[in-house]
Amino acid sequence: MVFVVAHVRGGGEMGRLWYENGKLLDKKNTFTDFIAVARHLVDTGLTSQQQLVALGGSAGGLLMGAVANMAPDLFAGILAQVPFVDPLTTILDPSLPLTVTEWDEWGNPLNDSDVYAYVKSYSPYENVTAQKYPAILAMTSLNDTRVYYVEPAKWVAALRHAKTDGNSVLLKTQMHAGHGGISGRYERWKETAFQYGWLLATADSDRYGGGQGNDLDGAAPA
């Protein structure tokens, strides 16, 4: 097992310039950087496309949705936690609690047609198409006020309608949680076990056949 953290542009861990080069009209650098890291892992033999699974949450969930559209054949599975997969709809609505403050990050599509077109061109929900997708597990929370549960729900529905393969696309909703996930130490451990169980089952599907995913029947495998 190899665990890799991709330091993509748009993150702040590599300095201010690294962050600036992955926001606004440079946001796609985040996605192409992540794909480049994934391809490097395959090309160097650290993993294979049949074993490679990706995980990201919130804005990182947007990343998961974008790479699922852009490079679906590169991953066996993708786990998107409270994913921001319909950014265009959200940042077009200034009545939502975080929209106006988020314009500095994504741009304001209400006042700038270039921003509108650019966000639409990478929005995971807007760009679901008829193609093969990896196995996907989307996690959401009913009481999430940052990324409403509607976003992953409609994304999953679009994927199920459009995809041309037999891989599973699952949606798991926490009915009593917010953006940070379920509270309580033991409940959080159970949730983590469920997610990691799905990741491992997907990577090991049919002993590295990859991609089918696992319904898990509501629980992580023993």
Image: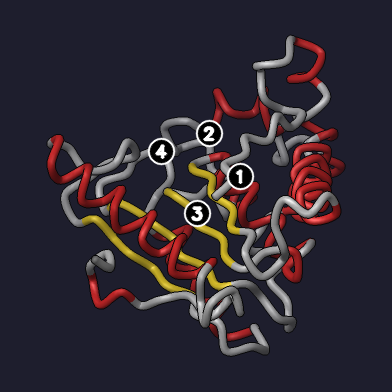
Disc 1 vs disc 2: Cβ atoms closer than 8 Å?
Answer: yes
Q: Residue at x 84, y 34 (%)?
A: 25
Q: Are marks 3 and 1 in contact (CB under 8 Å)?
A: no
Circle nearer the N terminus (3, 1): 3
Is 188 situated above or below 106?
Answer: below
174 and 196: which one is in front? 196
Q: Tag 2 or tag 3, which sits nearer the N-term?
A: 3
Disc 3 is placed on an element classified as: strand
Spatial separation of the CA atoms under disc 3 and disc 2: 21 Å
Q: Earlier in the sequence, mark 1 or mark 2?
A: 1
Front tag of 3 and 2: 3
Q: Which amino acid does label 2 sit on?
A: Thr
The amino acid type found where label 4 is placed reads: Arg
Q: How is the image coloured?
A: secondary structure
Q: Which mark is residue 99?
A: 2
Could you tell which of marks 2 and 4 lies nearer the N-terminus? Answer: 2
Where residue 111 appears, x then y in whole percent? 75, 35
| Circle 4 or circle 1, nearest the eye | 4
Q: Name the residue under label 4.
A: 146
Q: Which of 181 and 154 is in front in this view?
A: 181
Instruction: Give how far apart the Cα atoms at labels 1 and 2 are.
Output: 8 Å
Circle 3: is it few (<14), some (14-19), or many (20+) Cα within 10 Å?
many
SS category of the residue bearing label 2: helix
Q: Where is residue 8 in the image (x, y as percent from the top left)?
A: 73, 32
